[in-house]
Amino acid sequence: MTSYPMIRKEFHELMKTYKILIVPIVFIALMITQPITMKMLPEILANSTGLPKGTVINIPTPSAPEVLSTAISKFSSLGTFVLILVAMGTIAGEKASGVASMVFVKPVSRAKYYLAKAVTYYALTIGSMLIGIGITAYYTQLLFGQLDWAHVWLGTLIYIPNLLLVVTTTICASSFFNNAVGAGGASLLFNIVIFTVPQFLGKFLDMVSPGGLTNAAIMMIQENSTIAEAAITAVPGLAGVLTLNFVFFFMGWYLLERSEI
């Protein structure tokens, strides 16, 4: 059996469990609330109780790129959690239920099984992010003004490897653990550390970390630099994050090959 039938099976599983609909909808919900909230904030404050009579609150109207970059920044933590929840049982759950052992009775190598899982969840993540950012950017432009769509899409492409790293580390943990909760907990702990700690360990580690890549993506979306300048800024983060993706991808593959199912 080639990898293609396995990939097709995994996409069928995404449709069967409605993940192919749920994940894009959740991504949209997590991001689109930011421009809506920022648009309504002056009215909310004006109607709030407990303020002295005659109080005037002046809130500068943010630009559309600033609003969209804030949406990306706030999405990072909750988006990571959503991806872990979605992917943590992809292998561990099938090992626990016995589905994996039934698959391996057929002429299916563990390498093809693992590759199909990774490709499917990568595609789901990339597609969901592009749909989510597209709809959020559209509404941000309606509410706050014009966006440079070249900056929006390039900033999104710069940011996507961070999401793929979350998926890769979760699938890697799922290859090692025999239950989804353990895999999800290990991935969540790792991603909290890798996304937050490097900023306290010096400028170089911050630049090559996922946090540095997020900052480069936000710089691109905010149009604070030319595309060439932002791309150069993103190079260290891309190198670091893609290296981590590579390492954990093959580590998960190795762990699956070694595990008893």
Image (tube, rainbow, N blue to C red):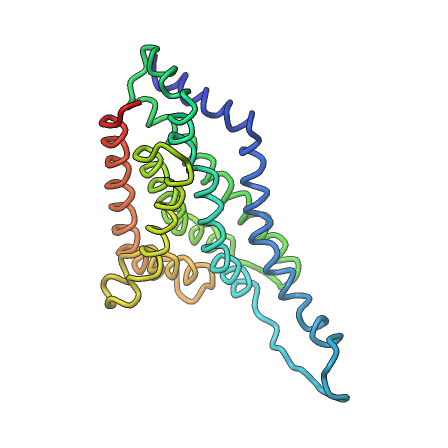
Q: Quadrant of residue 20?
A: top right
Picture residue at 29% right of the left edge, 22% below the top: 110
In this orientation, which residue lies closer to the viewer: 146 or 45? 45
Seen in the picture, residue 141 relative to 241 is either above or below; the reply is: below
| Residue 57 percent across, percent down from the top left | 67, 82
Quarter of the figure that contains the N terminus: top left
| Residue 211 percent across, percent down from the top left | 35, 59
In screen coordinates, is 63 left or right of 219? Answer: right
Q: Quadrant of residue 167?
A: top left
Q: Quadrant of residue 5?
A: top left
Picture residue at 60% right of the left edge, 54% below the top: 32
Seen in the picture, residue 135 relative to 5 is either above or below; the reply is: below
| Residue 104 percent across, percent down from the top left | 33, 16
In screen coordinates, is 64 left or right of 162? Answer: right
Picture residue at 55% right of the left edge, 63% below the top: 67
| Residue 42 percent across, percent down from the top left | 68, 73
Picture residue at 34% right of the left edge, 11% below the top: 105
Q: How many marks do you count on the picture?
A: 0
